[in-house]
Image: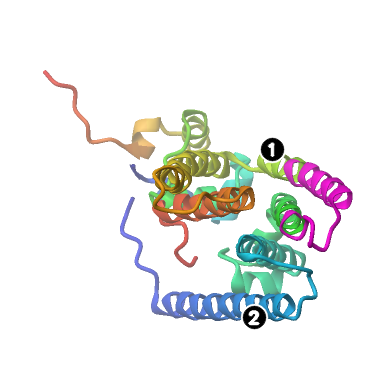
Amino acid sequence: MMSDNPPKSDAARKRSKSVVSLVSGGAVGFVGASALMVVIENGWLGEVGPSAVFALLVALVYAIIGLIVAVGTGSPTLGARVLNVEDADELREERPSLLTSAGGMLALAAVLAVLALSGEAGLFPLGWATALAGVMLAIGLYLSGQSLRLADELMRALTKEAAELSYYLGFVLIGGWAMLAHLGYLPAPAMLDLLSLLWAIGLLAAFWAAGRRGMLKTR
Amino acid sequence: MLNRVKEHREARGWSQGELARRLGVSRQTVNAVETDKYDPSLPLALRMAKLFGVAVPELFIDEWEPVA
């Protein structure tokens, strides 16, 4: 591969895009998390314990990413400013894969949120929580599968790498917590904590796999 | 792996999108191969070589030499 030094105008475009992406992503995340905390503190979601707060925050991250990708793909001109693509046409070309992936993320966000808000003092009674989480999980798994089917070999390779990294992260984080809890150094994780960790690890591994290949650099 | 995909693509006046369309992959894949972030599968490497009318070792440079 020959050396590939972008011209200054291209470097400036990338810098500006990085700033826009970081600022807009940070702002959406901050506003979303703040709004969630206000809603929780006002008791509008029923009784929400620390495990449920963690689960809701993880679900919020999934929802925000899913929404940004969905809106960006639906409106490619806008999306090209914040998503890591070369131009709006790339979003049009990848629309089926990106939209199913975004839908999958939103559905998985809903599963975790419903589970977090279920239970005796939660917003959703057991029956509703089971039905809602079950339906959303089925939708999420179907859309994630469709997204993978629509993806080309690079995305499939990244998915495999992320799955591999997820195993190691899970071993360290979930396994580490379980070991320390078993020895009495930490309280045992609640089932919801384990689920939140699984969701969080999946996302972390996906970013790690992409970052390892230098694919988080602004294009 | 070092490669000359960009060189061959530009020699034909194709954009990354055009090459991606001809290969049946995403533009991101072409970009990742060209910038050495991703080594393509053997089938894709063969398709690239066939498209450019060159042998795979002319497109992808491996400096490994067999031990005598």
Give the image quarter of residue A37.
bottom right
Q: CA distance from mark 2 to mark 1?
A: 36 Å
Visible residue check, residue B26: yes
Q: Amino acid at mark 1?
A: Arg
Closest to the observer, B14 or A20: A20
Q: Residue furthest left?
A: B68
Colour mapping:
rainbow
The numbered mark 2 sits on a residue in which chain? A
**Disc nearer the start of the sequence (2/1):** 2
Residue flagged by tag 2: what amino acid is it? Ser
Q: Residue at x 62, y 47 (%)?
A: A191
**x and y percentages locating residue A75 in the rendered image:** 75, 70
Q: Residue furthest top?
A: B68
Residue A184 locus on image (x, y percent): 41, 48
Residue named by callout 1: A149
How far across and down, in percent of the image, does residue A106 sit? 74, 57
Q: Is residue A44 above or below residue A108?
A: below
Q: Which mark is residue A34?
A: 2
Q: Which residues are magenta?
A: A115-141
Inspect the magenta stretch and tell me whether residue B5 lies in it: no
Is disc 2 placed on a helix, strand or loop?
A: helix
Residue A151: % across, % down? 64, 43
Decide whether the magenta segment is chiefly helix, strand or loop: helix
